[in-house]
Amino acid sequence: MQQYEWDFGAVLAYWPMLLQGLWGTVAISVLAIILGILGGGLVATLRMSRHTPLRVIGTIYVEFYRNTPGIVHFFWVYYALPVVANVNLGPLEAAIIALATQSSAFYAEVLRGGIQSIGKGQWEGATALGMSHTEALRRIIVPQAARRMVAPFVERSFEIIKTSSLASTLAYGELLYQGMQVASITYRPLETYTLLALIYFLLLYLLSSLAKLAEDRLQEV
Amino acid sequence: MNDTPTPDTGAPILRSVGLRKSFGSLDVLKGIDLDVKRGDRIAIIGGSGSGKSTLLRCLNFMERPTGGQVILDGERIGDARVAKDGSETITYRERDLMAVRKRVGMVFQQFNLFPHMSTVENVMEGLVTVLRRPKAEARERAAQELARVGLGDKLDVYPGRLSGGQQQRVAIARALAMDPEVLLFDEPTSSLDPELVGEVLRTILSLAEDGRTMLLVTHELGFAYRFATHVIYLSDGVVHETGTAEEVFRNPQRDKTRAFIARSSEFSL
Amino acid sequence: MGYQFDFSMVIKILPVLWRGVIVTVELTIACLAVGLILGFFVALLRVSPAAPLRFVGRAFVEIFRNIPALIQLIWFFYAFPIVIGAQLSPFVAAVLGISLNTAAFSAEIYRSGIQSIERGQWEGAMAIGMSRAATFRRVVLPQVFRRMLPAFTNRAVEVAKVTSLASVLSVHELMYQGRVLSSTFYRPLEILTTVGLVYLVMIYPMTWASAAMERRMRRRA
Ligand SMILES: Nc1ncnc2c1ncn2[C@@H]1O[C@H](COP(=O)(O)OP(=O)(O)O)[C@@H](O)[C@H]1O
Ligand SMILES: [Mg+2]
């Protein structure tokens, strides 16, 4: 076998493109996380509602997203949603809608899991003090649940960052898409994709180390 | 049954000489000398944290001693190596320790039954995987042992469906099936509801009638008095007082022993 | 609005989608089998008493968990062949990428399963003279499989979803067929919605089974 000459220099020469891609990844991830938290709160409220129709809607929403692949959501939003809703969506808008609706479902489960992990005794204790349902939720349940939700919340957010790479299939210029351009310009797919893998690894590893630090802090108080 | 002679005859089956164990800087056992003859029933008593469990666990090498020796049936366990300065270190080979555990059985406070195996499978497990007995023979033997502890009708039940007392009796049957020469009990009734303690103690007493060699850690001093031929009072990692059950319980020689026995309010001889 | 949903289109594309379903199932089974077996050995490294082995296991898990699955697929299809000097079929590249990803996640399932077995189980077995190996095989592992069955089923759900990414490498699985049909017939709404529903029908039973097992275990505990 002939020796392959590695040349990362050729790829690194295009660093502004990659940096732009990294920015794209961060931008859609952050937006999707923010929108996902808001949507997740709404969906969780539906899922835990006392009214059966609302609960059913919440459940269907969550189950649909849990049981279908992310790439289907991206394609559906980009190609099918404009047909139903009669709107025009660019890759950026489509990617954000797909990511945010999907993460709403997952965050909703994090919220619900956390709240339901608090025993009935806590609800009863609060109610016995004369608190209303909302007061009990806000003052007794959520503060305890929050701590347990940190780890799954972080895990879900990492999934969103990784899933944002699917936006490349809609030709949105996030890191993977930019990398594909660099690979085809330089004819250096080995170096390019290895570099991309490394960037993602470092990004997520760094974030997860930070998250672990924050988590430990939180457990101490 | 075993060819167990009557108490206090012949050479000791199990001995420890200057047995030491420390966890890091914590010295738990500070040189324990122990002689167990065939048919002896030794009750080990002492305050919580005094090293009773550690002593038992060193005798069947669930914990590796950090000093001293264990001698099983005249044979010293482990390979001694003498350093240039004359000090001796003992290394243990896992294979040798497994051989010891085959001969020295143990019953735990928490039973430690295997939840994914039925009662009879729990008792068969050692016979099949350790002693390599054929399955049919092992099953028959296991059924016998279970019948002996009064659970002949629970062969195919899973441990999760049994009461604590029944689980502990299965654990005793599991140990007995291996035909151990010495049987160790570490507080076998401490995690049981009070109404279930009796059935387990009766089972243990029935083994005494068979002449089994046993060491028992317990807080039930009344039972210890009825059960034991010898008593060891452990305190601060040393044998503070030892003698026959009669001597230690009726006429303790040292203040600390006397105080300990007096403190155990449930004790009535 | 006034868009007419064309049901006849749904009927028309079902035979083609069915061919995709078969490939999706093949991919899922292959990746799951390889991933679960490989993951087992990675888990053994993770719990090994030897620090260097533990490090190797940890590195494997961190690398394949923190890099987006799509990057792994693309890397194995476009970059890996350069390293080994031989072309890989899209199917093989997809199996490689997804299996390693699955192995990393399953290794963590095995590991937490092994570590969740109480010390008393080891001691109970050792006290009747069983070797470490025999204890692991006969006492610990069967309980790990039982306890972790819901987690492994969840992993199977994730694998089934991730196989959709193989469409990017033109593996003729369900999503690929959907993408091709959608651009052939200009009926993205009908076609992509159908694709989503087919995934739902395939995957939902596994999610349901996993939840049912979890409920039963909680009841028993
Ligand atoms: N594995 C271990 N690691 C560290 N310390 C231990 C360990 N096992 C026991 N100890 C310590 O050794 C001392 C004696 O413990 P143990 O033998 O269990 O006492 P007893 O059974 O008499 O209550 C205690 O202080 C205990 O904390
Ligand atoms: Mg103890």
Image: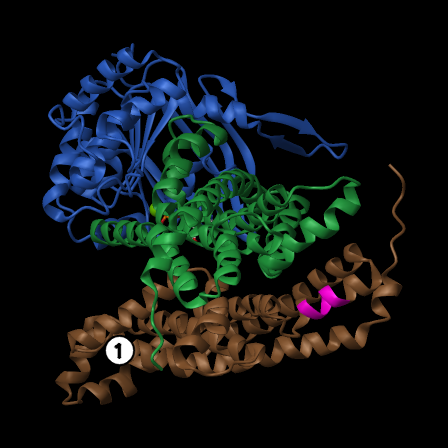
Would you place residue B37 above or below residue C152 in this image? Answer: above
Q: Magenta stretch: residue A179 in it?
A: yes
Colour assignment, chain B = blue
Supply the letter of whichever chain is brown: A
Colour assignment, chain C = green
The front one of C108 and B68 is: C108
Would you place residue B22 above or below residue C2 in this image? Answer: above
The front one of B258 and C44 is: C44
Q: Where is residue B255 in the image (x, y as percent from the top left)?
A: 31, 51
The answer to whether residue A21 is left or right of residue B32 is right
**Residue range highlighted in magenta:** A177-181
The front one of A4 and C178 is: C178
Instruction: Categorize mark 1 by other alpha carbons within 10 Å: few (<14), some (14-19), many (20+).
Output: many
Residue pointed to by mark 1 = A46
Residue type, label 1: Leu
Q: Mark 1 lies on which chain?
A: A
Q: Magenta stretch: residue B70 in it?
A: no
Name the element at disc 1.
Answer: helix
- Label 1 CB sits under 8 Å from any ligand 1 atom: no
Q: Where is residue B265 in the image (x, y as percent from the top left)?
A: 17, 53
The front one of C58 and B113 is: C58
Q: Position of residue B242 (x, y in %)?
A: 34, 36
- Is residue C60 at all visible to an observer of this figure? yes
> Image quadrant of residue A135?
bottom left
